[in-house]
């Protein structure tokens, strides 16, 4: 059992996260005495689908101090009404509601439990959670999913991971009509990983309508397989683009989806994987700190771009990621431009070298070292760390 940075609330809470992030394993370790309702078991799901009020009967027979876990709550979202009623009866009663898809929950109305159950997320491993077991090269190829990390045949698990989602979450739930089109879309969307989202271009590649692509992107977001990063526009002095960037949630999942052939440059694929690995760490860091900050990127119409802007209660950082072993003056140009517009911002360049140094007021840090030291109990980086 590898300890996680996630700290559970004392009250009832939703715990969302993609399949394989270790939600069930973590809960069983932290709440060994909890009453467990696993909706992945077909007979259990049928039972509660037919009579959601059975939860009321079951819960009222239990001690009010005994936590109740409902695993994969999106399978029977009608149970939320019963959960709501039980929490109203006794606010000390704790429910732990896990989910790997937000789609049905949104339709049922998470607002039903607003203020009564806190929304939390569990992410793939962070490097600091793995400690000495973290290996950057391996993370770029295999990702940071606990289900993959613990497997002896990691590549095989990654290959079947997306198939599992298509079969269990997409096909069975009737979210799409044409599985073939959706499969082509998943391959095509891997080229958009770390890039500005262009629905029309993806539609041309998949030979489907633009609105179909928009629907597919919404599906993979609801299934927590991807997330968008908006452009930073606060107090803008230059004209910026308006489109969002898209990232797949795990570097290994990205690598398993991304086609490779003779004309695909390995350094281009690895560069996108490195940027995505940093993105997923920043998301996890922020989530485990209580979502005090927002993750952005910055790009002007003259193609000056900073990969990540972290802005919020904890501070203001601009972060550029370079898949290179040494820092050249051109690598700092975007960050220095951003500094001119936002002198309050601390700027960081992450690269694949070994030395940490300050150049032109930019902290240049080895990416592996940065990830290994990124923990939720501290801010991203302080110049005093040098």
Image: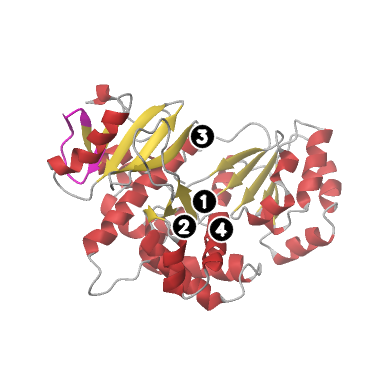
Mark 1 to mark 2 CA distance (whole Å) = 7 Å
Mark 1 to mark 3 CA distance (whole Å) = 20 Å
Q: Earlier in the sequence, mark 2 or mark 4?
A: 2
Q: Residues within 10 Å of mark 1 (few under 14, many from 20)?
A: some
Q: Residues within 10 Å of mark 3 (few under 14, many from 20)?
A: some
> Residue 275 location in percent, x, y?
32, 49
Circle on res. 22: 1
Q: Which residue is mark 3?
A: 291
Mark 1 touching mark 3, by CB under 8 A? no
Dot 2 falls on a residue whose secondary structure is helix
Left or right, residue 230 beside residue 13: left
Can residue 287 be spotted in the picture?
Answer: yes
Looking at the rendered image, the disc whose residue lies closer to the viewer, 1 or 4, is 4
Mark 1 touching mark 4, by CB under 8 A? no
Q: Earlier in the sequence, mark 3 or mark 2?
A: 2
Q: Which residue is mark 2?
A: 147
The residue stretch that appears in magenta? 349-362
Mark 3 to mark 2 CA distance (whole Å) = 25 Å
Which quadrant holds residue 117? Answer: top right
How many badges with numbers are in the image?
4
């Amino acid at each position: 059992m590898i300890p996680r940075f996630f700290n559970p609330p004392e009250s009832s809470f939703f715990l969302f996260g993609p399949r394989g992030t270790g939600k069930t394993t973590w809960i069983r370790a932290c709440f060994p005495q909890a009453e467990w309702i696993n909706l992945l078991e077909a007979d259990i799901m049928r039972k509660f689908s037919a009579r959601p009020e059975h939860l009321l009967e079951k819960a009222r027979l239990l001690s009010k101090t005994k936590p109740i876990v409902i695993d994969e709550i999106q399978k029977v979202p009608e149970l939320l009404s019963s959960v709501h009623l039980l929490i109203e009866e006794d606010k000390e009663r704790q429910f732990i509601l896990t989910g790997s898809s937000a789609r049905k929950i949104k339709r049922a109305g998470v607002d039903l439990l607003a203020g009564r159950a806190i929304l939390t997320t569990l992410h793939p491993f962070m490097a600091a959670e793995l400690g000495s077991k973290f290996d950057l090269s391996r993370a770029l190829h295999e990702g940071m999913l606990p289900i993959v990390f613990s497997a002896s045949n990691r590549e095989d698990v990654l290959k079947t991971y997306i198939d599992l989602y298509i079969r269990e979450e997409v096909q069975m739930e009737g979210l799409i009509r044409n599985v073939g089109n959706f499969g082509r879309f998943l391959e095509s969307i891997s080229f958009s990983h770390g890039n500005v989202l262009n629905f029309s271009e993806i539609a041309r590649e998949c030979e489907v309508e633009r609105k179909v692509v928009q629907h597919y992107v919404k599906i993979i977001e609801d299934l927590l397989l991807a997330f968008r990063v908006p452009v930073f526009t606060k107090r803008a002095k230059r004209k910026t683009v308006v489109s969002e960037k898209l990232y797949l949630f795990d570097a290994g999942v990205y690598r398993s989806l991304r086609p490779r052939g003779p004309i695909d440059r390995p350094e281009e694929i690895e560069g996108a994987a490195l940027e995505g690995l940093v993105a997923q760490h920043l998301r996890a860091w922020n989530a485990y700190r209580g979502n005090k900050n927002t993750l952005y990127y910055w790009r002007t119409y003259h193609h000056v771009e900073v990969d990540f802007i972290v802005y919020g209660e904890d501070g203001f950082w601009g972060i550029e990621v370079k898949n290179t072993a040494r820092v050249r003056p051109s690598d700092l140009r975007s960050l220095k431009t951003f500094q001119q517009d936002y002198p309050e911002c601390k700027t960081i360049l992450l690269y694949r070298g070994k030395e940490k140094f300050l150049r032109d007021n930019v902290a240049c840090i080895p990416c592996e070292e940065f990830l290994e030291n990124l923990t939720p109990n501290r801010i991203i980086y302080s110049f005093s760390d040098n």
